[in-house]
Image (cartoon, rainbow, N blue to C red):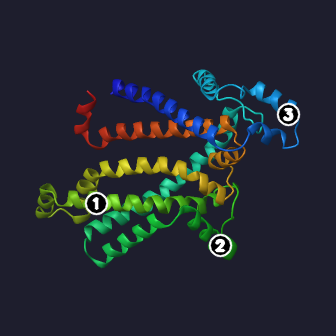
Amino acid sequence: MFKYILKRFLMVIPVIIGVSFLVYFIISLTPGDPVKMMLGEEASEESIQEVRDELGLDKPIIVQYFKYISKLVRGDLGVSYRSKRPVLGEIVARFPITLKLTFWSMLVAIIIAVPLGIISATKQYTLTDSICSVAALIGAAVPNFWYGLMLIIWFSLGLGWFPSGGYEGIKSMVLPSITLGTTAAAIITRMTRSSMLEVVRQDYIRTAKAKGVNKKVVIRKHALRNALIPIVTVVGLQFGHMLGGMVLTETVFSIPGMGRLMVDSIKSKDTPMVLGCIITLATVFSLVNLCIDILYAFIDPRIKSVYK
């Protein structure tokens, strides 16, 4: 198990290098001069050239990239062009907000999706199954930003139950969590239904029912546990998708997390900040996938033999 964890942890390194390489060169191809954005359009050419020399932006792109990587391996994410502050400090200040919103969103998704998926599978081809399937399809099709705006209009501007934006305690997390959570719930519901349908047709489920075991016990103790592997997999993937989805959600709800920080940094072509945010999200996503793989061994003891 330890060797497996170490191997997977080391695989994060090439992922980070690959992600940073792609993002760095994509940003370099976007229009705009970060130095002019920093100093303003009326800045003199001498001032622009001086700052460009100071930041190393006068060198070829490949040289700039390797200089960035040499600092990255030492844990230095650079300094923001826009705020003049260390990127790591900005991320440390913003990331807990994004992580908290992701946690609540995933909790909303699981609370909605798993029961609906189980009900849909146990009542296959009934009206209940059709309603759950249509709800999941609509939830997957509705864009996050539109859904978020509708929630603001209904529950904030209309009823006044929740704040329309900002980060001022648990109430400000409700609408963004529902916005992200319902979209993920649609996908998790469909996976739960499919996984449960495959399990409930197995012989050992029929045997348990034939022995007179309570139906709820059969579903909860036998069927659900054996259906958890695909469900846990899609939950892990949706966690990473939520981290990426924060870009739109945090912008719509004016939440000062990493998603909004990335949007502001992209607008000002703040390359160190954009790279720092994306590398952080890629690292967290890789670690979440590692945790999911380890969790498999606790859900299904047969998988432990794979790690030996």
Amino acid carrying mark 2 in the image: Ile
Amino acid carrying mark 3 in the image: Glu
Relative vertical location of residue 103 with respect to residue 276 in this rendering, above or below: below
Reading the image, the residue beneath label 2 is 153
SS for dot 2: helix
SS for dot 1: helix
- Residue 262, given in percent of the width and then of the height, sits at 64, 45
Q: Quadrant of the C terminus?
A: top left
* Spatial CA span between label 1 and label 2: 35 Å
Work out whether residue 20 or residue 277 is closer to the camera in this orientation and state it. 20
Residue at the (60%, 27%) spot, across then down: 65
**Sequence order check, earlier mark of 1 and 2:** 2
Amino acid carrying mark 1 in the image: Ser
Residue at the (31%, 79%) spot, across then down: 127
Q: In the figure, residue 89 lies in which quadrant? A: top right
* Spatial CA span between label 2 and label 3: 48 Å
Residue 45 image label: 3
- Residue 57, given in percent of the width and then of the height, sits at 71, 29
* Spatial CA span between label 1 and label 3: 63 Å
**Sequence order check, earlier mark of 1 and 3:** 3
Reading the image, the residue beneath label 1 is 194
Work out whether residue 288 or residue 140 is closer to the camera in this orientation and state it. 140
